[in-house]
Image (spheres, helix red, strand yellow):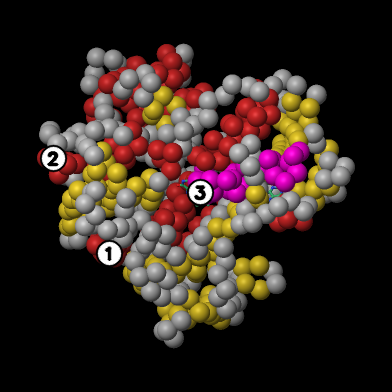
């Protein structure tokens, strides 16, 4: 028997534990998880905030007789000499191999009044785990106004989620544009007007100086320019920092994250690190697909098993905002790039009144970048074209408006029946249409069944309608499933 200890029962640590016991019958895993509940789909936490998904739907942990899962138990120290982990209850867990998968922590900007010796004050939140999501939801139930700090992807998701709950939201962002890495000026302006329609006021080029309270309750914030905003709660979405505390205390080499080589080994050959806490040679992206790929690679490295690691390259730079009431996706060449660059043919459609913006960047007959706001179907088409590297129509304008694409359906929107068996449906988990058809033929009759058999839909969840389509095709093969057709998108 070989004992592997995994620190962190998150999206990546739990996936690794499940895969390694399947790959090698001689392996037993102890999985230490600081949170009081087993692993869940953290990517969908903003949907819990928005009230579009209930917390129990996020559950992803699977039981296995050779995985000892300890919830609510943190690893306190790593004793590298004796090769054991001491947990928060003082118990010792000897290991042959140790895998650190401690994820990341939310960055808390240095703003006066956000925290005291007990941590964040009442009414001030980050969104990193289920407890945060539940705290935000409870507070939103009592709040009339909220300030969301940071207009990156998460900030927009939280702001729209709170607005959906009837809270009046002010979005404060330090850069001059929303999502400045992904959106150019025009796209940002359209996004701002779309947010305004949802009851969200954006304040760009602004930052918070101080959170003010009266009798222990948040009442307002003061901005750096001296102005004030009344608010009942503040949610800070200011990025994340790899959780390296344990590794640093154990003397492992850390920079921003825990430094690992191509085999995911840290500076101690018996200790590996995967997921958001790790800093691999090519850099960390903070996206779950990269962590899952690392988990699979590590299973192969530790067991010699032949496992297929997902190719995350195609989806790595597709950024999708899971915002309630505002579809938004950006990929590849986007943001503030040089539109006069002769390598690119750039087409755009701007409709601030309708809250729509579409920009496509074509080079060598392929879509190399796109930004789409306010049209979920066009966004899906563009994501599919980009991630699958499908050819662009001779007139790329057809990509921008559904009506031009013939019969209403965007060119790349696929009827599930037409998908080839080797075509990827779930990009997050690399699940093909063929694998889903097999599962359905084998008796899986709901999305939940298919998810538990194949893992499809358990990442970003974008492929859910396509999986539904494949299930319907099996039930009634003669009916055209076009009505349920959709295309998968990147994570
Ligand atoms: C709201 C939100 C939305 C997101 N949206 C997306 C998205 O759309 N697409 C995408 O790709 N990614 C998204 N992410 C990022 C994605 O969730 C992470 O990339 C992924 O969860 C990383 O998995 P992980 O296992 O490395 O870390 P985590 O899932 O964070 O898990 C780490 C676990 O380790 C535990 N831990 C830490 N220290 C200890 C200790 N000492 N002892 C025991 N346990 C410990 C933590 O409590 C946590 O449970 C989002 C994240 C959030 C918070």
The residue carrying mark 3 has its beta carbon less than 8 Å from ligand 1: yes
Contact? badges 1 and 3 (CB < 8 Å): no
* x and y, in percent, of residue 206 in the image: 41, 75
Residue 184 visible in this rendered orientation of the protein: yes
Residue 88 visible in this rendered orientation of the protein: no
Q: Is residue 358 left or right of residue 34?
A: left
Point out the tag, 2 or 1, that comes first from the N-terminus: 1
* x and y, in percent, of residue 359 in the image: 23, 51
Residue visible at 74% across and 39% down? 269
* x and y, in percent, of residue 193 in the image: 26, 64
Which is in the foreground here, disc 2 or disc 1? Answer: 2
User: In the rendered image, which quarter contains the C terminus?
Assistant: top left
Q: Which mark is residue 68?
A: none
Magenta-colored span: 265-288
Tag 2 residue: 395
Tag 1 residue: 185
Q: Is residue 278 above or below residue 239?
A: above
Q: Which mark is residue 285?
A: 3
Point out the tag, 3 or 2, that comes first from the N-terminus: 3
Residue found farthest to the bottom: 226
Residue visible at 46% across and 29% down? 430
Between 355 and 79, which is closer to the camera in this rendering?
Answer: 79
- Alpha carbon separation for disc pair 1 and 3: 24 Å
Point out the tag, 1 or 3, that comes first from the N-terminus: 1
- Alpha carbon separation for disc pair 3 and 2: 34 Å
């Amino acid at each position: 028997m070989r004992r592997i200890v995994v620190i962190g029962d998150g999206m990546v640590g739990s996936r690794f534990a499940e895969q390694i016991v399947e790959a090698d019958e001689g392996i037993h895993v102890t999985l230490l998880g600081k949170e009081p509940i087993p692993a869940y789909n953290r990517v969908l936490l903003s949907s819990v905030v928005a009230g579009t998904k209930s917390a129990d739907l996020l559950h992803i942990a699977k039981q296995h007789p050779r995985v000892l899962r300890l919830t609510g138990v943190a690893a306190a120290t790593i004793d590298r000499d004796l090769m054991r982990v001491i947990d928060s209850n003082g118990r010792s867990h000897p290991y042959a191999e140790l895998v650190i998968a401690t994820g990341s922590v939310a960055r808390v900007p240095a703003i006066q009044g956000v925290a005291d010796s007990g941590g964040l004050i009442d009414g001030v939140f980050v969104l990193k785990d289920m407890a945060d999501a539940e705290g935000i939801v409870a507070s939103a139930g009592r709040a009339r106004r909220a300030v969301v700090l940071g207009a990156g992807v998460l900030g927009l998701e939280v702001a729209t989620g709170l607005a959906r709950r009837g809270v009046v939201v002010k979005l404060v962002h330090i850069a001059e544009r929303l999502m400045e890495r992904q959106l150019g000026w025009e796209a940002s302006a359209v996004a701002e007007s779309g947010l305004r329609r949802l009851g969200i006021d954006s304040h760009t080029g602004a930052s918070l100086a101080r959170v003010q309270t009266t009798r222990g309750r948040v009442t307002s914030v003061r901005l750096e320019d001296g102005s004030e905003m009344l608010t009942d709660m503040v949610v800070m979405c200011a990025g994340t920092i790899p959780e390296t505390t344990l590794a640093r205390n154990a003397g492992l080499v850390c920079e921003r994250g825990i430094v690992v080589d191509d085999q995911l080994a840290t500076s101690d050959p018996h200790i590996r690190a995967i997921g958001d806490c790790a800093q691999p040679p090519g850099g960390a992206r903070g996206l779950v697909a990269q962590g899952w790929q690392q988990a699979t690679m590590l299973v192969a490295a530790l067991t010699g098993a032949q496992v297929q690691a997902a190719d995350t390259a195609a989806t790595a730079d597709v950024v999708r905002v899971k915002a309630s009431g505002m579809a938004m996706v950006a990929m590849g060449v986007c943001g503030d790039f040089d539109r006069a660059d002769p390598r690119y043919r750039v087409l755009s459609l701007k409709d601030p009144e309708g809250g729509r913006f579409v920009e496509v960047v074509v080079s060598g007959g392929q879509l190399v970048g796109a930004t789409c706001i306010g049209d979920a179907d066009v966004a899906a088409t563009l994501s599919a074209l980009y991630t699958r590297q499908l050819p662009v129509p001779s007139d790329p304008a057809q990509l921008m408006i559904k009506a031009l694409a013939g019969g209403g359906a965007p060119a790349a929107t696929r009827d599930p029946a037409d998908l080839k068996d080797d075509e990827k449906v779930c990009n997050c988990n690399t699940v093909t249409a063929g694998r889903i058809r097999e599962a359905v033929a084998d008796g899986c009759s709901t999305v939940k069944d298919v998810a538990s058999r194949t893992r499809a839909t358990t990442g970003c969840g974008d492929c859910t309608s396509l999986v539904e389509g494949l299930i319907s095709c099996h039930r009634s093969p003669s009916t055209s499933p076009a009505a349920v057709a959709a295309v998968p998108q990147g994570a």
